[in-house]
Amino acid sequence: MPCMYILYSEKLNKYYIGACINMERRLYEHNIGHSKFTSLGIPWKLLYTEQFEDLDAAKKRELQLKRMKSRKYIEELISKKK
């Protein structure tokens, strides 16, 4: 199922926002250093997901959050989900 997700790295004290179809596989890829940026922050923890009907909708939501450039908003989203 397509989703938008937020990961967190304690090592970097940073959040990472992405979109994918298979969350389990994508988290695995982040934690084995599949991409250059996320390899610096291993281990990544999955803190938040939103499910969508298709990948395009998940990517639109990803871009919406990235454009906000707001750590405070991301942390509020995560805290509301818990």
Image (cartoon, helix red, strand yellow):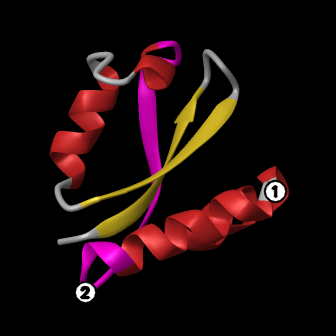
The picture places residue 77, in percent across and down from the top left corner, at: 65, 68
Image quadrant in which the C terminus is located: bottom right
Separation of marks 2 and 1 at Cα, in angstroms: 26 Å
Residue at 32% across, 81% down:
52
Q: Residue at x 28, y 22 (%)?
A: 34
How many numbered badges does the structure rendering display?
A: 2
Q: Residues within 10 Å of mark 2 (few under 14, many from 20)?
A: few
Image quarter for residue 58?
A: bottom left
Residue located beneath label 2 in the image: 53
Q: x and y percent of residue 75 in the render? A: 72, 56
Q: Which residues are magenta?
A: 40-56
Q: Is residue 37 positioned above or below 23 on the image?
A: above
Front one among 67 and 33: 67
Mark nearer the N terminus (2 vs 1)? 2
Q: Quadrant of the N terminus?
A: bottom left
User: Given the image, on which type of amino acid does mark 2 rest?
Assistant: Glu
| Residue at the image position 34 percent from the left and 76 percent from the top | 56
Quarter of image, res 2 = bottom left
Residue holding disc 1: 70
Vertical relation: 80 (above or below) 9 = below
Which percent across, then down, holds residue 26?
Answer: 25, 42
- Badge 1 marks a residue whose secondary structure is loop
